[in-house]
Image: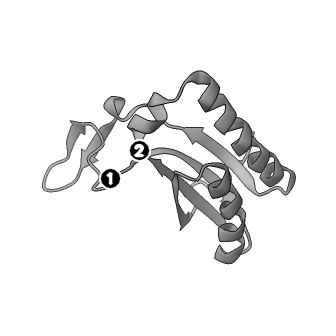
């Protein structure tokens, strides 16, 4: 089953890191990413741009697009993964390692239903 893994973090903290600090964190995370890739579990992953560049489509009687991320969260959604696991327990086990590599982040796991099931998971 495919899962979306949404990565939340306090954007101000992430943006305060020096390049060396960010590189060190990413090196730790890439060790987990490489393991998941070797296991055939990791699909596309992305770091999102700053929230000040975001727009939000609000629903209602008419659609309204507003600047900024207006989700009701303390942290900001800063990235996401698409991963393939047999069940939620396996996803949680693998993401425990990702959480150890980036302990100040929060990861939300959601099952995915593909709208384009013929599209490749990886390039």
Mark 1 surroundings: few (<14), some (14-19) or many (≥20) residues within 10 A = few
Q: Earlier in the sequence, mark 2 or mark 1?
A: 2
| Residue located beneath label 2 in the image | 10
Q: Residue at x 68, y 57 (%)?
A: 83
Element at badge 2? Answer: loop
Q: In the image as oriented, which residue stretches furthest toward the left?
A: 61
Q: Residue at x 73, y 45 (%)?
A: 122
Q: Position of residue 63 (x, y in %)?
A: 19, 47
Is there any visible trace of residue 1 in the rendered image? no
Mark 2 surroundings: few (<14), some (14-19) or many (≥20) residues within 10 A = some
Q: Position of residue 3 (x, y in %)?
A: 61, 63
Task: Answer with left or right where residue 82 lies relative to residue 63.
Answer: right
Query: Which disc number belongs to residue 21?
Result: none
| Residue located beneath label 1 in the image | 74
Residue contact between numbered discs 2 and 1, judged by CB atoms under 8 Å: yes
Element at badge 1? Answer: loop
Q: Position of residue 58 (x, y in %)?
A: 23, 49
Q: In the image as oriented, which residue stretches furthest toward the top?
A: 19
- Of residues 79 and 62, which is closer to you in this image? 79
Q: Quadrant of the C terminus?
A: top right
Task: Answer with left or right where residue 83 lies relative to residue 36.
Answer: left
Task: Answer with left or right where residue 10 lies relative to residue 18.
Answer: left
Q: Position of residue 113 (x, y in %)?
A: 56, 65
Q: Residue at x 16, y 56 (%)?
A: 60
Q: CA distance from mark 2 to mark 1?
A: 7 Å
């Amino acid at each position: 089953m495919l899962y979306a893994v949404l990565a939340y973090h306090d954007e101000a903290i992430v943006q305060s890191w020096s390049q060396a600090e960010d590189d060190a964190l990413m090196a730790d995370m890439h060790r987990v990413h490489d393991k998941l890739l070797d296991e055939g579990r990791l699909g596309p992953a992305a770091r999102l741009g700053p929230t000040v560049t975001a727009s939000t489509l609000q629903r209602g009687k008419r659609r309204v697009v507003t600047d900024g991320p207006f989700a009701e969260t303390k942290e900001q959604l800063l990235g996401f993964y698409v991963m393939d696991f047999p069940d939620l327990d396996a996803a949680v086990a693998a993401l425990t390692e990702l959480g150890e590599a980036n302990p100040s982040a929060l990861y939300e796991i959601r099952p995915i239903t593909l709208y384009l099931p013929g599209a490749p998971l990886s390039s």
